[in-house]
Amino acid sequence: MIRLLCTIVTAACFAAPTQTSVESTTAWPPAVPIAPRTGTPTQRTPTSIQAFALPEEQWRCSFSIVAPSAERMRLAGSFNGWNPNACDMHRDADGTWRTTLTIPAGTHYYKFIRDVDDWMPDPRNAERAPDGHGGQNTVFAVGEEALFDPSRTRRGDDFIVSEGLQHDPGIWRDLESTPDGGFRIASRSVAGDVESAELVFSDGRSIPLESRGPMGVFDRWSTTVPSDADGLEYTFIYTDGAHRVRDPKTYELDREQAMANQVRTPDWAKDAIWYQIMVERFHDGTPTNDPDPMRPWTSKWYEPSPWEGKDGQTFYEYYVFDRHYGGDLQGLKAKLPYLKELGVDALYLNPIFQASTHHKYNATDYRHVDESYGTGAGDFERTIAKEQLEDPSTWVWSESDLVFLDVLKEAKKQGFRVILDGVFNHVGTAHPAFRDVRTRGVDSPFADWFSVRSWTPFEYDGWAGFGELPAFRKNETHGLASETLREHIFEVTRRWMDPDGDGDPSDGIDGWRLDVPEEVPMSFWIEWCELVRSINPDAYIVGEIWKVRPEWLDGRTFDAVMNYPFAEIAFDWIGARENKITASEADRRFTEHRAAYPAEVTFALQNLLDSHDTDRLVSKVHNPDRAFDSGNREQDDDSYDGSKPPAEAYERARLLALLQMTSVGAPMIYYGDEAGVWGSDDPNNRKPMLWKELEPYEDDGYAVMDDQLDFYRTIVGLRRDHAALRTGSHRTVFVDDVQDVLAFVRENDDEAVLVALNASDRNAGVHIPVEADGWTPTFCTPGGPDLSSVAVTRESPDRCTVPARGGRIWIRKK
């Protein structure tokens, strides 16, 4: 791996054993040899990259490639969501193409894109990694991940990498306040280097630090201390073999600093049980707004309607993507009681604004709800005829807008929170601003909104290369380059968060899910999130970010992300076969992932198992051992089995759902999972919702599975009824790799909930080492395909059987 450094570790950084005796820690500072700091400034780069350190673990990186015959060069990588249009390069006179951008510290992957779609690794950087599609990505690292190499360390060798001993009381990772008024204090050492660590105070107290396991290139060490330590000085002592060294710095424990480090998220979001709804496929509440043509709701999925394919199109190319089934907001309102009975209390709606597609990610207008979701054809055109796009004072409410506001009011009355999908990176080609630009060119007042490459001929960038989705112009300073575009989005934000504009946001939406936010520079989101919280301090903001990205959740931008890494770990343990990980490895990875974010954030993460962008939960289980969200489209991989999965796959899907409902983080159900809907990735993950009153459906086996629905109602109810499952602490108490069992306790001041899960195909007899008395058996999955009833046995944790592909739960009241 190419490693870009501001310092390097020399031999002197590995502190040799010292014979100095260790005195009592009552002396201050402790009489323990100080770990030397001997790094020397340097800069190592491949010839194609120059990197310069910035504050807050950011790096300014300049990339270059020599390509004199290329007509266009772009840079795409893990740092910009692999968006081919996020970073155009500029050509020098000698044929060298260059671009500069700011990226966070860490390991990154990238490619150059030559001309239209020639993706190529960096010819001047030999470090490579498979790209998952038969090619190679280029790899480089900046910051600490470039500086420290855990492969060079070994516990018990009497050596400690001194430069790797780190503590910064100015960041949440190392100092946070706790709810009881105490403190959580943490430090880091290079992974695999240190055997033990302790925290020493100026009043003589010494507290062992607990190992939290590796996180990247570091091991994390932490402990909690009581409130009476406020104001004391402290330092750290590290031990490896016979060698002990202390942090060369001493620190003062400062409550104000700990409070300042604390990232806050809305309390309700930590308690939320989410349900994701694609409105067009959820329920058709009225025929008055049905689009034309419209598919019958219960029709065979893979068979064409009479009008489909007449022009030579095939199912996947492309008529399935143009289908409409008539789902609308009236249908959502009618099914609120169903959702209430299911037990969910927070709704995430895929885009609902005016657009031509079923998914609505090609917005025609952010100001208005799609007429096919409201009052029907003609509503939109009648409304915008009264308005000027650039003048918010002329904006009015369409009839379809009022339908949504009525549904929103009723949902809130029934106790639901509601967030909308904000797609502020691109629009559709029917958007009035883009149509004006296409007609008037540089004379359009919206000319600076879009990423236009050429005015004559007219060429522009579309999201992910799709011409149907013209992308907005970006810059580092403001994120979205156009001031009038930013103001337009700010006005749209105010409109939906406080519809009557009276300063009371209770009549507005409760927050936003943001589509592809990494493709818009963070500077825009910092400004936008500040606006959102000024309108409603209790608003929830969640980003579609697929990997661990702590820099996006530091209090300046989002409250949470869609927690795809949770799903990836869960499937690697419960859903995989040949490539499955052990229970202990799953526990290690879950622990590391929970430590990646502040606790306030971790409790609010949207823990999902599938979505409109992946294959369905049960189909994913039925097609195991594929990289997460890879090889899951039937049109691209004919080995994917898109038929109804067998009973065993549903059992494992239920076990995954049980893990989801008992884990730290706010669970999110994708519509229909609870009823048994299956399908590969887009488009087959977007089938019409199953409803009893509409049966029979024409597809064999496509019907509400009562046992599945009852199971979901039960486990959702468990989470709803026990606060410890929502916001309690998490402690692993038992791992058995032979039997593939993992058990953990969720706990708060009132109760403890013990959860035992068995990912194997055999019943497991286990002894779980917890307090023997006071546990009440509460839940048990039967060891078989019939889950129409939930059996609760009387076994206690100290000697019990955990069903194959199932789990047990006990409650202990305090």
Image (cartoon, rainbow, N blue to C red):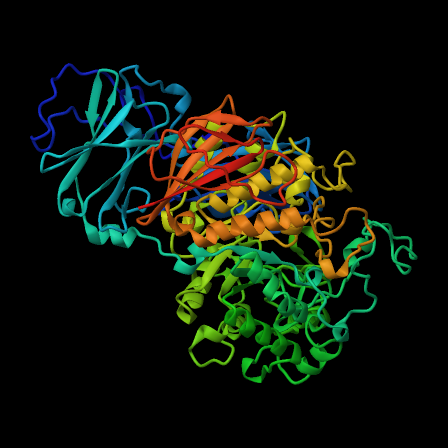
Q: Position of residue 471 (x, y in %)?
A: 63, 59
Residue depicted at x 11% and y 26%: 31
Q: Is residue 585 above or below residue 544?
A: above
Q: Is residue 309 above or below residue 663?
A: below
Please tell me which residue lies in front, 674 or 710.
710
Residue depicted at x 43% and y 77%: 504
Dividing the picture into quadrants, the one containing residue 276 is: bottom right
Q: Is residue 690 visible?
A: yes
Q: Is residue 225 above or below residue 572?
A: below
Q: Position of residue 789 (x, y in %)?
A: 60, 45
Q: Is residue 490 above or below residue 779?
A: below
Residue depicted at x 26% and y 53%: 259
Residue depicted at x 44% and y 45%: 664
Please tell me which residue lies in front, 297 or 739.
739
Toward the front, the furthest residue is 794
Q: Position of residue 443 (x, y in %)?
A: 65, 73
Toward the left, the furthest residue is 27
Give the side of residue 492 with respect to residue 686, left or right.
Answer: left
Give the side of residue 657 with respect to residue 26, left or right.
Answer: right
Please tell me which residue lies in front, 544 or 452.
544
